[in-house]
Amino acid sequence: MVSAAFPDSFYLEADDRSSGIRVERPAHGLSVGMRAEVTGTVKTNADGERYVEALWATKNGTGWVDPLGMNRKLLGGADFLFNGSTGAGQQGVLDGFGLNNIGLLVRLWGRVTEVEPASPPTWFTLDDGTGPGVKCVIPSDVTISPAWQLISVTGISSCEKVAEELHRLLRVRQQADIVPVQ
């Protein structure tokens, strides 16, 4: 199932939510709620995330996947069959705990503690009390409200390299994925 779609990439997730992966394909034409077939080569990007460099991607029906609720401590998870010598598998995040969930649609809750000072901002930090906050990256058409305090955020579990460490990252799909909690 397509769980997220961006202009030059999308994410596929298994029906049972056991696995997900980023797919790089410019002008792919797919959207959330579609099933897709992909052919390509599995690689790892500069931020340490496994992806498929697709030769082609096509719609193959429809379907839906719900997000997995989790806290910051579980986001990203530990290594999954990772071999630093060969690059096989998916590396876990710094202090990763539990099953690797990079590429899956997830939902987090917490307090907005920081907003990128640039204008317009491209990220904010969410703190749920289980450790350092999680960086939440937003698309250009999503705005950050100064009124947000406690929120629910849905997005793709991802990662980014900071120095040589792999950090947790949440990729927000759209404005509706950010909901204030009363």
Image (tube, rainbow, N blue to C red):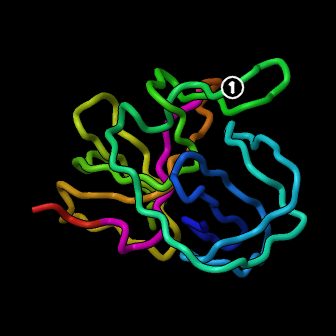
Q: Residue furthest left?
A: 182
- From this view, report whether residue 127 is shown above or below residue 2: above
* Label 1 crowd (10 A; few <14 / some 14-19 / many >=20): few
Badge 1 amino acid: Leu
Q: Residue at x 72, y 77 (%)?
A: 60
- From this view, report whether residue 70 is shown above or below residue 82: below
Residue 119 x %, y %: 45, 65
Residue 156 x %, y %: 51, 54
Q: Can you tell which quarter of the image residue 30 is in?
A: bottom right
User: Looking at this view, is 129 or 76 the one in front?
Assistant: 76
Drawn side of residue 21 relative to residue 123, left or right: right
Drawn side of residue 23 relative to residue 155, left or right: right
Secondary structure mostly seen in the magenta stretch: strand
Q: Which residue is drawn at 59% across and 57% down?
A: 13
Image quarter where the C terminus lies is bottom left
Where does label 1 land, which residue?
81
- From this view, report whether residue 53 is shown above or below residue 9: above
Q: Which residue is drawn at 62% across and 34% down?
A: 161
Q: Is mark 1 on a helix, strand or loop?
A: strand
User: Looking at this view, is 3 or 115 the one in front?
Assistant: 3
Q: Give the range drawn in magenta.
A: 166-178
